[in-house]
Amino acid sequence: MPINSVIQVQNLIKQYGEFTAVGNISLQVHAGETLALLGHNGAGKSSLIKMLLGIVKPTSGQITMMGKTVTHEKDRRQINLGYLPENISLYEKLTGKEVLNYFAALKRIDKSKVLQVLEEFGLEHAQDNPVKSYSKGMKQRLGFAQAILSSPDILLLDEPTVGLDPQASLFMYQKIDELKRQGCAIVVCTHELAVVEDNIDRAFIMANGMELASGCVETLRQLTDLKVLFKGEEINQAIAEDEFLNTLAVNNQLLIHQVDKPRVMQYLTQHCGVYNFSIEEPGLSDIYHHCMNNRHQNVA
Amino acid sequence: MFTPILTIASKEIKDNFRNRWVVFIGLILTSLSLIISFSGSVVTGELAVPELPMLMASLSSIGVFILPLTAILLSYDSFIGEEESGTLLLLLSYPLSRSQILLGKFVGHITVLACTIVFSFGLTAALIHVFTGTELSLLLPLFCHLVFSSILLSMCFVLVGYVVSLQVAEKAKAIAILLFIWVAVVLVYDLILLTLMVAEAVELSSQLLQVMILLNPSDIFRALMLVAAPQQDTSSSLSSLVQFPLSNLYIALTIWVGVMMLISQSLFHRKIF
Ligand SMILES: Nc1ncnc2c1ncn2[C@@H]1O[C@H](COP(=O)(O)OP(=O)(O)OP(=O)(O)O)[C@@H](O)[C@H]1O
Ligand SMILES: [Mg+2]
């Protein structure tokens, strides 16, 4: 096992009775890396996270975190880990500061860190108000603050930005980025593909408990072989003038397979003298939909 | 080992005292306890309290209704509530064992209940001493029994609350089931037991009666107070029907607490999320 592989999952299976929630998943997350867990509702993302936490016992398979095998809750207690569950509503009757003080005490973290984190997350003005008076964004920030109180080595976030406005989401991902740069290994479950795309290192797409595809966005583009769109005034002109380009074009659009991208670029610059164009790559969202649609074809 | 338990306990205490109904129920218990002690004075026009054994029987009667109810109101959402809000899952991701979480909650809830009990009965005892001059040497042992057995009874029902809270899928179900248990155990069961007690014709019932007392913590509590403060002069003294010495009744109540603790621990440890 490579030293910097902080989370290592091998052939993980979780069955609830007859139903397979997670079926034979293997993955790795390195220090200073963000992995996005993507998948439809009920794909098994949260179950996977709960198994990483040792809260849910796998039916079979192996989990290693920070070099320790995790099969039970107690194995995980020595690991410095932060977690934000999905749909969490923190103790509404307590104030923001009391909530963080409580969690800090449970992790034996000094109270001064709580004040620092409250300030960092822009909650210091509301620290003495009860959590029930907080806005959705403030609550989510409080939950996130809770997860990073201990400056964790591993951060598991289950839909941290659900219901947040775009700016608030961005703020969360900036924080995630900061932690990543400090060497934290991060796993984030999310459905917000557009937001997550620029903020992750790798994506792991799953459906019905199985892996569909994984890798960095570039790898996924190659893997799915989604087409690239060449755009620009000069391109349109070239299509009209050049016979070869004309045969490639569909509806006057130059949509090219990933594998042909370098060759077409070369052809455009060297043969047609076209330099002024842009390339529209498929986004994570396109890749995701492609994977999901293909899954249905495979099933059918 | 103990620090996390105390951290969770103190959070529960803060949470529950902020919950005004705990204070409200505490005041009800206090008022009832004072009313029972001093209501005779209203009739006679001078300060007097009933004979101590009578008083103890009356105080244990209100205790047996109110304490289990308070205990279940305090504990019904401890697990299902935190499960619904997601904080239970979060706590499980912390460096804590499930036993520590359960014990932390238990210590917190019992502290809240013990404060209520000591305040209510303590104030009653103090006022009786001040206004009627009843000697402390007479009052104190009886009120100590009342307080200790009340705490044990509350422990039982807090744990019953946990057991239900760990089993159900929604908060509303937990409170419904617990209120049903409360009615069955405190009201219906007692009614049956009392009927048996007064039906002198049924000779055989004496042994059955002993068993029935042991099978219900609230009846152990009642029996305990009857034995602790026996009524001397009444010929058909109820206390003579209880054939256990005081110590055995304490042991029985403690066993109930222990068994309920084991059941709730094992349910929590086996709980799947
Ligand atoms: N305790 C359980 N008992 C039975 N089935 C369960 C249990 N927990 C989860 N499941 C099932 O396992 C499947 C995966 O659930 P999971 O919560 O992991 O999905 P998810 O990918 O997180 O979905 P979402 O995006 O909606 O959060 C679901 O079909 C769910 O019903
Ligand atoms: Mg989920």
Image: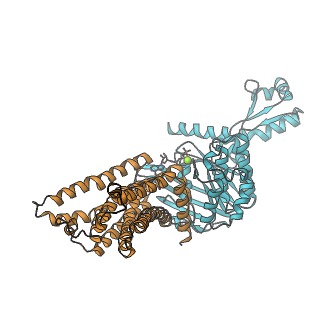
Chain colours: A cyan, B orange
Residue B166, given in percent of the width and then of the height, sits at 42, 56
Work out whether residue B131 or residue B237 is closer to the camera in this orientation and state it: B131
Q: Is residue A88 above or below residue B262?
A: above
Residue at horizontal 56 percent and vertical 42 percent from the top:
A40
**In the drawing, does residue A244 fall left or right of residue A67?**
right
Quadrant location of residue B251?
bottom left
**In the drawing, does residue A106 fall left or right of residue B104?**
right
Residue B239, given in percent of the width and then of the height, sits at 23, 67
Work out whether residue A100 or residue B116 is closer to the camera in this orientation and state it: B116
Q: Is residue A119 above or below residue A68?
A: above
Residue at horizontal 71 percent and vertical 53 percent from the top:
A176
Residue A133, given in percent of the width and then of the height, sits at 63, 45
Q: Is residue A79 visible?
A: yes
Work out whether residue B182 or residue A121 is closer to the camera in this orientation and state it: B182
Q: Is residue A199 visible?
A: no
**In the drawing, does residue A35 fall left or right of residue B116?**
right
